[in-house]
Image (tube, grey):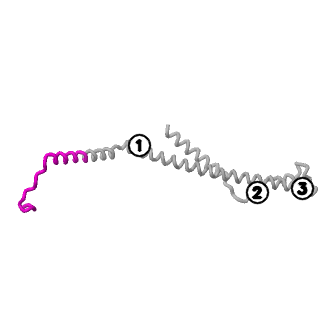
């Protein structure tokens, strides 16, 4: 009742059996190592912590670069505004001197008004930039504190 019409199957040689046993042992060893790695909760937790540290470091670097860029942009705006205010004040004082006002007296209301800084029309959230810098410093200190 065999499929080969009564012919007997050839028995494997001893070398073939040994090779088969060797292959089975290798596969079994790999399976045991994979199961042991899954069962090692402490090592998996350490790996997860290390991955999280790397993510936080990358985010801290990214946030630092953003804050630096914002600080450079804000510094440029401040310099521009200061230059414009100085030029405006100089022009107003010159105008007062030319019109015969009390421009020579530094305590006169005309000079005080002319040199007064202009009112901001565009909101520059300087307090938000400061809060962002503080938050970045806090994150960096927390990350460094966990390393120790």
Between circles 2 and 1, the one closer to the viewer is: 1
In this rendered view, identify the residue nearer to me: 55 or 10.
10
Determine the residue positioned at 55% across, 43% down: 140
Q: Residues within 10 Å of mark 2 (few under 14, many from 20)?
A: few
* Residue that carries the numbered disc 1 in the rendered image: 46
Q: What's the distance in space between the residues labelled 1 and 3, CA to CA?
A: 73 Å
Q: Which mark is residue 119?
A: 2
Q: Is residue 10 left or right of residue 96?
A: left
Q: Position of residue 136 (x, y in %)?
A: 58, 47
The answer to whether mark 2 and mark 3 are in CB contact below 8 A is no
Of marks 2 and 1, which one's residue comes earlier in the chain? 1
State yes or no: residue 3 in magenta.
yes
Q: Residues within 10 Å of mark 1 (few under 14, many from 20)?
A: few
Q: Which mark is residue 136?
A: none
Q: Is residue 110 left or right of residue 18?
A: right
In this rendered view, identify the residue nearer to me: 10 or 65.
10
Between circles 2 and 3, the one closer to the viewer is: 3
Give the quadrant of the N terminus. bottom left
**Dividing the picture into quarters, in which one does residue 22 lie?**
top left
Q: Position of residue 36 (x, y in %)?
A: 31, 44
* Residue that carries the numbered disc 3 in the rendered image: 96
Residues drawn in magenta: 1-27
């Amino acid at each position: 009742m065999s499929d080969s019409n009564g012919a007997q199957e050839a028995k494997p040689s001893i070398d073939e059996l040994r090779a088969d046993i060797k292959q089975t042992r290798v596969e079994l060893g790999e399976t045991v190592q994979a199961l042991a790695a899954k069962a090692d909760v402490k090592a998996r937790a350490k790996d997860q912590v290390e991955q999280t540290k790397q993510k936080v470091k990358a985010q801290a670097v990214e946030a630092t670069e953003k804050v630096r860029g914002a600080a450079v942009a804000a510094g440029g705006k401040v310099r521009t505004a200061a230059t414009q205010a100085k030029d405006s004040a100089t022009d107003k004082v010159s105008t007062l001197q030319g019109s015969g006002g009390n421009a020579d007296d530094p305590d006169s209301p005309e000079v005080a008004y002319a040199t007064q800084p202009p009112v901001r029309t565009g909101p520059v959230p300087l307090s938000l930039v400061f809060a962002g810098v503080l938050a970045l410093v806090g994150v960096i200190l927390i990350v460094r504190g966990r390393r120790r």
